[in-house]
Amino acid sequence: MIDIETLIVGGGLSGLEIARQLQRQNRSFQLVEARQKIGGRILTQSAGRGNDKANFDLGPSWFWPGQNRIESLIGELGLAAFEQYSQGLLIYENEQGQIQHGAGYASMQGSLRLRGGLSVLVDALARHIPDHLISLDNRVSAIKHDDESMLTHVVHNGGESQKIIRSQNVVLALPPRLAATDIDLGEILPRAKRELMEAIPTWMASHAKVVAIYERPFWREGGFSGDAMSRRGPLMEIHDASPHESGPYGLFGFVGVPAEARIDANKLKNACVQQLARLFGPQAGEPIDLVLKDWAQDGFTASGLDRTPLMYHPAYGLPKALSSLCDGRLILGSTETATRFGGYLEGALESAERCVSELFGRTPLHQW
Ligand SMILES: Cc1cc2nc3c(=O)[nH]c(=O)nc-3n(C[C@H](O)[C@H](O)[C@H](O)COP(=O)(O)OP(=O)(O)OC[C@H]3O[C@@H](n4cnc5c(N)ncnc54)[C@H](O)[C@@H]3O)c2cc1C
């Protein structure tokens, strides 16, 4: 049994920022993360061929001017942003496969990306948190409590062994829906509250992203921005995904095929390449690499309830009934609990800020 002040469940952007703030204040904490790596929905992969490789974002890519928390965090960590490539013609494909150039879609002009990909932000945050305070490959399976402490049951993914971490507070820095479906909270939360958590959709959990990588940015050279919208699919929205500095270059698209129909990954990848060739010309049909990330199949982001794509951006925020849980000892975090920028990276930081102020606002039961 370990005795700590705060246990943070989840090492995505929100959990890491909470950890960084607690470390800064010299507070006692531990972060447990189910995956073998930190970052959560932030996922950057090196792709290309041979020595010709670069980093491509398979989760989020962008943040936007006016999102002050992420902007100032990037500045504070000494990271560099750049503007999404958006010069040139746009492409629109209708249901019949007829293609129009320069029509039909507002580009992502003005959106910002991070040099090296968003995992650079994750790595920079992690440098402020001592390694031994982050436990990877450790999935929380149940949370209970006794009179004094929260008792979090943690299973090491590789084995059967289970440990119980005893803490004063627990912050759930993972999507509330996932927490309600995957973690046994039956002893500490009534069914109505767990159902309320389940009803909060996890942003982008039903999506899949495809990145096609090329030696040359031939679409730019031909006067196209890389932006395309298609009503035929399988990709419904395509953008330039290239690194800032040099190649290899990339186009990424969000898959429009519903999660339950995305069974054969190779078939889907082939159909995406054919579509790219249809839209951008024959060179697009010969990528040097192609990466598919299906978030709906990833059990540490999506639950079975996240198969259906959201048709709208939900009005996120922490419902009143889900605040002050377990006398304030159980705190819900993650971007889905943010009021202003819920769903976005900025929302993950917004929720981290609230969690930290809730933790600091209370006098600790013990001196840690
Ligand atoms: C394809 C895609 C595109 C996106 N595009 C953008 C974009 O361009 N701009 C933008 O602002 N946002 C975008 N988003 C949203 C953005 O990724 C999220 O807002 C942000 O990453 C959420 O961070 P978080 O820490 O709240 O949650 P998460 O990143 O989901 O972190 C939760 C963590 O909890 C862990 N976990 C889960 N279950 C357990 C358990 N039982 N025990 C322990 N740990 C557990 C997970 O492994 C994960 O690391 C996109 C998301 C996706 C998937």
Image (spheres, rainbow, N blue to C red):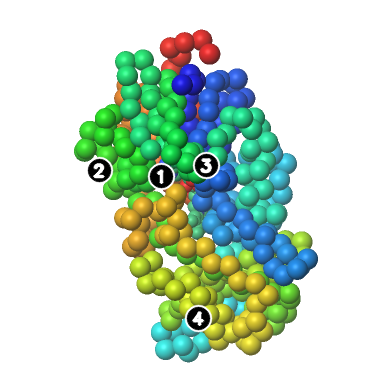
Q: Label 2, on which residue? A: 195
3 vs 1, front mark: 3
Is the residue marked by circle 4 packed among few (<14), some (14-19), or many (20+) residues within 10 Å?
A: some
Q: Is residue 279 left or right of residue 329?
A: right
Residue name at image x 48 percent, y 72 percent: 265
Residue 262 picture location, percent across and down = 41, 70
Q: CA distance from mark 3 to mark 1?
A: 18 Å
Quick check: 14 above or below 152?
A: below
Within-10-Å neighbours for mark 1: few <14, some 14–19, many 20+: many
- What is the distance, in whole Å, between disc 4 and disc 3 at their CAs? 34 Å
**Does residue 104 show up?**
no
Q: Secondary structure at mark 1?
A: loop
Q: Which residue: 42% across, 56% down?
A: 205
Compare marks 3 and 1 and give the one earlier in the sequence.
3
Q: SS for tag 3?
A: loop
Q: Which residue lies most toward the front here? A: 160
How far is disc 1 from disc 4 in space, using C-alphas?
32 Å
- Name the disc covering residue 271, or none: 4
Q: Is residue 350 left or right of residue 258?
A: right
Type of the residue with mark 4: Ala
Residue drawn at x 56%, y 31% is: 19
Mark 1 within 8 Å of ligand 1, using the beta carbon = yes
Q: Are marks 1 and 4 in contact (CB under 8 Å)?
A: no
Disc 1 to disc 2, C-alpha distance:
13 Å
Q: Specify the amino acid type for callout 2.
A: Glu
- Quadrant assignment, res 122: top right
Closest to the camera, between mark 1 and mark 4, is 4
Task: Give the left or right position of residue 60, taking residue 116 as reference.
Answer: left
User: Is the residue marked by circle 2 packed among few (<14), some (14-19), or many (20+) residues within 10 Å?
Assistant: some
Checking the image for residue 137, the label placed there is 3
Q: Secondary structure at mark 2?
A: helix
